[in-house]
Amino acid sequence: MNVISTEELLQKIDAGETVSVIDVRESEEVATGIIPGAKHIALGQIETSMDQIDKSVPHYIVCKAGARSAMACEILEENGFTVTNVAGGMLDWEGELQF
C-alpha cells in the first residue's frame, strides 16, 4: 500500500497539483473540518459508492488517524483503484480546513 505523510500531501496541494482526496470519516467528524476539495465518502459506504470514484486518477485516502483510510485503500485497491493512504490522518493535518 502506498503511503504519504500529511506534510507531503499539503506540499502537493500548496504547489497547485490537482489531487483527489477522499475523506472516509463519519459525517459528524467531517463537520469539524475537511481538507479543501476533498470528497466525503464514509468508510462504510466505500463499497457501494465506487461508481462515484474516478478510476482513471490516483486518490489520497484520509481518516482521523490512518487506520480506516488503510482499510478503504485495501478495498479500493482490490477493485482496481490507485490509492495512497494519508498517514496520521486529520490528527496530523496542519493545512487550512474547509467547513
Image (cartoon, rainbow, N blue to C red):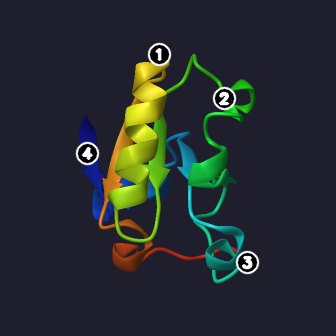
Frontmost of labels 2 and 3 is 2
- Please name the residue shown 67% across and 50% down the image: 41
In-image side of 49 versus 12 (left or right): right
Could you tell me if the residues under marks 4 and 1 are in contact, i.e. CB atoms within 8 Å?
A: no
Q: Position of residue 46 (x, y in %)?
A: 61, 41
Instruction: Tell me the amino acid under the disc marked 3.
Output: Phe
Circle 4 Cα neighbour tier, 10 Å, few/some/many (<14 / 14–19 / ≥20):
some
Frontmost of labels 1 and 3 is 1
- Please name the residue shown 40% across and 73% down the image: 93
Q: Earlier in the sequence, mark 2 or mark 3?
A: 2
- Please name the residue shown 38% across and 66% down the image: 89
The residue beneath circle 4 is 3
Q: Earlier in the sequence, mark 1 or mark 3?
A: 1
The residue beneath circle 3 is 99
The quadrant holding residue 33 is bottom right
Distance from disc 1 to disc 2, alpha carbons, whole Å, reads 10 Å
Distance from disc 4 to disc 1, alpha carbons, whole Å, reads 17 Å
Q: Earlier in the sequence, mark 1 or mark 2?
A: 2
Instruction: Tell me the amino acid under the disc marked 4.
Output: Val
Instruction: Tell me the amino acid under the disc marked 2.
Output: Met
Circle on res. 80 = 1
Could you tell me if the residues under marks 3 and 4 are in contact, i.e. CB atoms within 8 Å?
A: no
Helix, strand or loop status at disc 2: helix
Q: From the image, which quarter does the N terminus lie in?
A: top left
Distance from disc 2 to disc 4, alpha carbons, whole Å, reads 21 Å
Could you tell me if the residues under marks 1 and 2 are in contact, i.e. CB atoms within 8 Å?
A: no
